């Protein structure tokens, strides 16, 4: 782990510590950095998934699902 000296907003750090339940400033910063990385990766993946949907890549699967549902219903009629 590296040591870096930075100026941070004391009020924002204190609020982040409170919200995260962190015990130290170091823990708060590390938790925030890890959270940022995870959220950024999830947003990127969600964007890729949305783009696939916009291209219609899931239309065939949705139609197959609907057809299967119709077939199950018809079997009980």
Image (tube, helix red, strand yellow):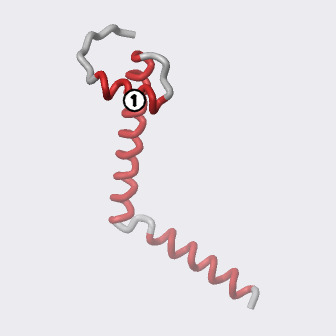
Q: Residue at x 33, y 58 (%)?
A: 51
Judged left or right of residue 45, residue 67 is: right
Quadrant location of residue 55? Answer: bottom left
Quadrant location of residue 71? Answer: bottom right
Q: Decide which of 18, 4 is in the foreground and name it.
A: 18
> Disc 1 marks which residue?
16
Secondary structure at badge 1 equals helix
In the rendered image, residue 26, in percent from the top left (x then y), is placed at: 41, 16
How many numbered marks does the figure carry? 1
Quadrant location of residue 14? Answer: top left
Residue pushed farthest bottom? 77
In the rendered image, residue 33, in percent from the top left (x then y), is placed at: 37, 27
Q: Residue at x 35, y 9 (%)?
A: 2
In the rendered image, residue 28, in percent from the top left (x then y), is placed at: 42, 23
Quarter of the figure that contains the N terminus: top left
Vertical side of 28 occupied by 74: above or below: below
Q: Decide which of 56, 28 is in the foreground and name it.
A: 28
Q: Decide which of 54, 4 is in the foreground and name it.
A: 4
Vertical side of 55 occupied by 37: above or below: above
Q: Residue at x 56, y 77 (%)?
A: 66
Q: Residue at x 33, y 8 (%)?
A: 3
């Amino acid at each position: 782990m590296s040591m870096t000296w930075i100026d941070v907003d004391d009020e924002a750090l204190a609020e982040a510590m409170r919200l995260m339940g962190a015990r130290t400033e170091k823990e708060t910063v590390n938790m925030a950095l890890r959270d940022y990385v995870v959220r950024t990766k999830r947003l990127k993946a969600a964007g890729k998934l949305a783009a696939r949907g916009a291209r219609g890549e899931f239309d065939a699967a949705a139609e197959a699902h609907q057809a299967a549902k119709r077939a199950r219903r018809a079997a009980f009629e």
